[in-house]
Image (spheres, rainbow, N blue to C red):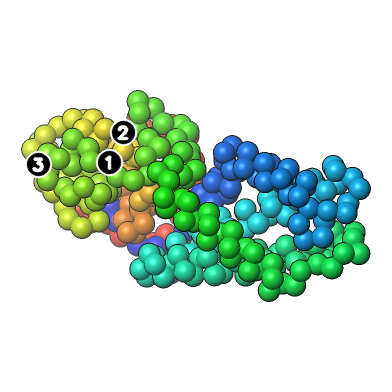
Amino acid sequence: MDTARKARPNPMPKVVSALQVALSHAFHWRTLVIWFGCSLLATYSGPFGTYGDPSVLHSLLIWMVLIGSSIVTVYVLNALNELFLAKLSSFIRIVVFIGVSAIATGSLVHFLLIYVFAHTSDPILSRGELSSYSLAVISFIHIVRLILPFSVTDQISNKGASEGELSSASLPPHSRLAKRLDIPAGVRISQITANGHFVSVETSEDVYRTRMRFSDAVAELDGIYGLTVHRSHWVHRNSIVGWVPRAKKPYVLLNNDRSVPISKTYLANVKNAGLTILDPEDVEVEQSL
């Protein structure tokens, strides 16, 4: 029996999940290394009227706060942008993200310099000038991330996975299962469901059905970023909104408003996977056989 649940028009669970992902990216160790390195560089170059500070430690603290708060702001805005503008084209989302992030970080730095770290008589750049600098920096970083194959996002969070169920690949690899079913390269497999001697393999574009064992189908995913939650259900990690542990039968809620039951065998894996915990009161239940 498969179950489907329809979420009420309450975006908060998805917002909370998006913010958790954003913060995990912002505080990833690679991001922290970049944050500290940029803070050191800014401390000794002294832009925006901070060069005259006689204390190196004080100046370093200032720049760690300025750059750290800007990094967190950008990651949060990116997560919200991807959540609420998901139906728009990627180009529009990028333009909106860069524009909003530049204004937000420029305003934030301006506020901190004037009202928190007002320690120098040197003139401080205006909010517009700081936003222009932010625009240039964010645009440059975004271009670099598009060019380079490595991304911090690709390396985030595979905690709690067992037997290789979670992988750090963010771009869908062309797995053996995808090749078997002639799924086009780059199309993400979002869910696998066992049905007797057959399995249904679902993507964002189509549903494929083939005769094979569920365990063999999961093995042929070749480590795609996902989680087995039941002996008959595997789901892509990015398809999961969160999970409801306090229901009569625990389940994970997907971003298409469907649910997948969690069996006792895989309950520990789900608990350790870092999923958002949802309140059953915020979810309406519809049963379908």
**Mark closer to the chain start, 2 or 3:** 3
- Picture coordinates of residue 32, whole percent (x, y): 63, 41
Determine the CA span between mark 2 and mark 3. 20 Å
Cβ atoms under marks 1 and 2 closer than 8 Å: yes
* Residue found 68% across the figure and 74% down from its top: 128
- Picture coordinates of residue 14, whole percent (x, y): 47, 58
Residue 10 position (above or below residue 193): below
Closer-to-camera residue (260/142) = 142
Q: Amino acid at mark 2?
A: Gly
Q: Secondary structure at mark 3?
A: strand
Q: Secondary structure at mark 1?
A: loop
Quadrant of res 176 = top left
Q: Residues within 10 Å of mark 1 (few under 14, many from 20)?
A: some
**Mark closer to the chain start, 1 or 2:** 1
* Residue holding disc 2: 223
Quick check: 126 left or right of 84?
A: right
* Residue holding disc 3: 210
**Mark closer to the chain start, 3 or 1:** 1
Q: Residues within 10 Å of mark 2 (few under 14, many from 20)?
A: some
Determine the CA span between mark 1 and mark 2. 9 Å
- Picture coordinates of residue 184, whole percent (x, y): 17, 49
Quick check: 141 left or right of 88?
A: right
Q: Residue furthest front?
A: 45
Residue 81 position (above or below residue 254): below
Quadrant of res 204 = bottom left
* Residue holding disc 1: 173
The numbered disc on residue 83 is none
Cβ atoms under marks 2 and 3 closer than 8 Å: no
